[in-house]
Amino acid sequence: MVRSFFAARRPASAATFAVIVAICGTLWAHAALAAGDLATYLPKVAPADFFQGADRFGPPQGDPPIVPVYRGEQLQGFVYLNSQFANATGYSGKPIQVLVGIDTKGVLKGFKLVEHKEPIVLVGIPEKRILDAVNKLIGADMGEVARGAAQAPQVDIVSGATVTVLVFGDSIVRSATKLIKSGRLGAPGGAATSAAPPASKAIDPAKSEVRDWQTLLGDGSVRRLFVSVADINKAFENTGNAAATAHPELGDPDDTFIDLYVADVAVPTIGRSLLGDDGYQRLVRRLKPGQQALVVAGSGRYSFKGAAYVRGGIFDRIELVQETNSVRFRDRDHTRLGSLAAEGAPDFPEIALFTVPSELAFDPIEPWALRLLVQRVVGARDKALVTFDLGYALPEAYLKRQAPPAQPPQAAASKSSATPVGETREVGMPPPASEEEPLWMRIWRANTVKVGLTVAALGALTLIFFFQNVLVRRPAVYVWVRRGYLLFILVWLGWYANAQLSVVNVLTFANSLLTGFSWDYFLSAPLIFILWASIAAGLLFWGRGPFCGWLCPFGALQELLNNVAQALKVPQFRVPWGLHERLWPIKYIIFLGLFGMSLYSTAFAEQLAEVEPFKTSIILKFAREWPFVLYALTLLAAGLFVERFFCRYMCPLGAALAIPGRIRMFEWLRRWPECGSPCQRCANECPVQAIHPEGHINVNECIYCMHCQELYFDDHRCPHMIQVRLKREKRQAMSSPSMRSGGKGPGTVITAGGKPVRASSADAITPPAT
């Protein structure tokens, strides 16, 4: 049996392997499209998009490259990619790629948004609104900004896409400033060396005393920004925005709007003073090589945290700025503190410890600023914005002067990592290897409860599958176990934890094979990683059924709504088998189309993946523009009459899982010889019509609801089991004490299964000899 099992799958496995090899070859053939550099995006634009009348691009110059733009033989200016000059990481955690046109005097001339992964833009806000807000920077003289003669221009924020717009605009301003300061545009006064001189200062690890609050505040270890109600109203008046001025902050002008404090607690003295010895040592163990950490505390009517980080995981009211680089903190960088350890420190309602993200090349020796962004609602969908900079420079008392290193950087790094036992290590320098901890490990630790609940839910599902025969023998219990599990998956895993898998995950995985696979990237989303790992294991045992039938929040929503519909006597439509069989391939066609498109443009494929209503109904909980909501509700309405309509005919993720699901190693669903010939009960009652008329189960379509297994063991509904029960009852009746006792002659009526049976003389049972 085992030999025949594998022999039956050998051709399919060979065909699958051949398909995989062909796909991988295609992926590598398109590897060049994945590079996110200037040469990749330049063919997608025209010179006239940046400079009126321009007709050609010149050859790239320098590193990072800038491309001259000409009108005939006359140089008009240059085009460059923002992310190659300044941090452009957006809400999604990936760069917003913008081509910027700037003339030789440093005046911004035009922009082209060439690629982004911003979910807010993709799912609800027209891209034109974002571009209109940023296009107001056109005409800004960045040469004046670079020389310090003018303040950096600000973009108008768009409600619902604040972070996206700010990153978009800031990356343009900072990249242009950096380019001008490098002297590569030839702007007057803009010459600057492209390489910074070697650092001559470092944090002195020997200075590690504990100081009180007033001392820290007095020597500049802790910096303060105080904004009153009068200050904030005056700031909005200075913007010239009449709508913002017409909505002033109410209250006494001297009332505190915000009282904000910041300090670099990676410095030993400051860290020990504000966090205490234990807190500081825990912080030191967490920090990666070269990483810093800040304490931010505030009071007043304006919260520096806001609520966006709860919804989207990003703090949109504060920003860390150093020269041309900036970064916004995410929830994974944040630790909530209850109080500060320094003697005399005030009681702050909000205290946060932020680790500076590794992607920011942050130098604690150089000055930096914590930028506070204050928004004011001026209309139903419009907001105004002002910013305040809380400048910070590390006091000289914490620094020591050092000569430039004589040995190569590699040797210095290896030497500094070998700190003797008992020696104090300077914070910000590379720690011993035993103390290094990947970011994904900290993310997992911060999500311990969610990870634990997810693992427990998967463990419970594994028990259900391994002991399915015990459970399905009690149909009433099994039905409520299944409904309860689906409700948990919908409410907790879907609506609360937002762990809804998508075909986009499959496309992203395929794309990562050609752009550089990294476990850290996939491990940074714990619940998604756990689900995919469990699905990979489940494919070997049960095929696609565990996910599609049990772990998909949208699938759970469809089934639970259909259960309600059946309870309310909504008529159920059974698709004729001939039509049903021809509708099956639609989801495979959709998946192959999305996969093929992802080889050309991953961003466009992700937009086409909106064929899945998962984002609308599960992630965003129907808080989207009406076409998306209408589409999702239409599919759910269809599911009221045809159970799991979307799963059956349209789901590209189900199709993607069904393909490798063919390699499953075991057959767990039992069948009787009579199944399909002549009995059609399971085929007629299968909720998704995954059983062929001839009796076999199509594992590509089976969602493993186990309804057929309920029937398999039911001796009142399954014809095979009914016959078994009747024979058993007859044997029991024939061997009963009343039949074995005397005085019962031929013609005695006995009962078998509740039906009268008259015993003939041939059936008479002779009493046993005594």
Image (cartoon, helix red, strand yellow):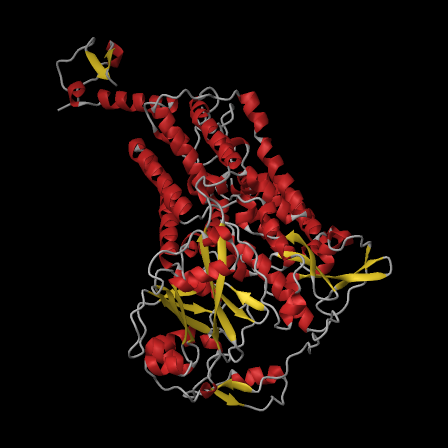
Q: Name which residue lies at 52% across and 80% down.
A: 365
Q: Position of residue 61 (x, y in %)?
A: 77, 67
Q: Please, is residue 50 above or below residue 294 in the view?
A: above
Q: Position of residue 311 (x, y in %)?
A: 42, 52
Furthest residue to the top? 747
Q: Please, is residue 466 above or below residue 113 in the view?
A: above
Q: Nearer the viewer, residue 128 or 532?
A: 128
Q: Position of residue 244 (x, y in %)?
A: 47, 53
Q: Name which residue lies at 52% across and 48% down.
A: 120
Q: Give the side of residue 335 with respect to residue 52, left or right.
A: left
Q: Name which residue lies at 20% across and 8% down.
A: 747
Q: Which image quarter: residue 71?
A: bottom right
Q: Which image quarter: residue 490?
A: top left
Quadrant where the C terminus lies? top left
Q: Nearer the viewer, residue 439 or 663?
A: 439
Specify whether residue 443 is in view. no
Q: Which image quarter: residue 424?
A: bottom left
